[in-house]
Each structure stands twice: as structure tokens, then as C-alpha cells.
Amino acid sequence: MILNLYAEADEPRNFIKVAVGTTVFLAVVGGIGVGMLGYLAFGNSCESTILFNMPNHMSIGIAAKICYLITIMGSYVILIQPIYHVIENSEWYINLGGTKSSLN
């Protein structure tokens, strides 16, 4: 999809600048808009971490907290893989009897 947009651009040399600038602008405007609407709706009574606002005695609050926990645990597994790769390919690890990673 990006390649098609790049090929169709009037000035392909400026495509990345325009794409990044537009994305940042939309993210900032969207974030400010959502923040303002949230403040107008809830005022200062809302905690900064949205999970603290959810009731502990209702099933929807518990389900949201469980989903958040699963997301954090799942992302840890993905983020730790490059570290394992570096360790498994290090010389001291191989000298200890470890095997070299097959991801090369």
C-alpha cells in the first residue's frame, strides 16, 4: 500500500516528510481532542491510569484488568527475544557449552 502511494506522489522525494508530518499532526490533534473531551466529561475526578477508575466489584472492570495483564505478559515475551538472540550468539555463552542461535 505504501509503495503505491509513493509511486503516485507528485514529488516522491518529499513523500516521507509529508507522510511523517501528516501522521504526527493527526496524532497530536487526535490526542489533544480526546484529552479535552475526557476532561470535559470527567473533570479532575478521573485518575491518570484509566484502570484505577474501573470498579473492582463489577465483571467488566475485572475483565478489562485481566485483558491488560495478558497484554503486558504477551508483550514481554516478544520484547525479550532480541536479548536472547544476542546472548545465544555471544562468544562467552558458546564457550560455556551453549548452542548458537539458528536465527542468523
Image (cartoon, rainbow, N blue to C red):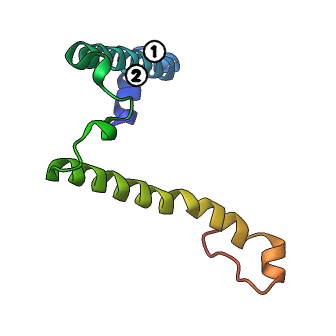
Q: Amino acid at mark 1?
A: Glu
Specify few, some or many for label 2: CA neighbours under 10 Å numbering under 14, 14-19, or 20 or more. few
Q: Residue furthest left?
A: 59
Task: Specify the label residue 34 is tagged with.
Answer: none
Q: Nearer the viewer, residue 68 or 99?
A: 68
Query: Which comes before the other along the chain, label 1 or label 2?
Result: 1
Question: For this view, does 61 lie left or right of residue 44?
Answer: left
36, above or below 98, in the image? above
| x and y percentages locating residue 15 in the rendered image | 46, 20
Q: Nearer the viewer, residue 29 or 91?
A: 29
Instruction: Give me the C-alpha separation between circle 1 and circle 2.
Output: 18 Å
Q: How many marks?
A: 2
Q: Residue furthest front?
A: 57
Q: Nearer the viewer, residue 100 or 53?
A: 53
Q: Residue furthest bottom?
A: 97
Quadrant of the frame with the C terminus: bottom right
Q: Which residue is mark 1?
A: 11
Task: Specify the label residue 23 is tagged with.
Answer: 2
* Residue name at image x 57 percent, y 61 percent: 80
* Residue name at image x 15 percent, y 49 percent: 58
Residue 102 position by quadrant? bottom right
Q: Amino acid at mark 2?
A: Thr
40, above or below 71, in the image? above
* Residue name at image x 78 percent, y 87 percent: 97
Question: For this view, does 74 lie left or right of residue 44?
Answer: right
* Residue name at image x 47 percent, y 22 percent: 20
| x and y percentages locating residue 48 in the rendered image | 39, 29
| x and y percentages locating residue 86 in the rendered image | 70, 64
Q: Are marks 1 and 2 in contact (CB under 8 Å)?
A: no
Q: Give SS at disc 2.
A: helix
Quadrant of the frame with the N terminus: top left
Single out the mark in the foreground, 1 or 2.
Answer: 2
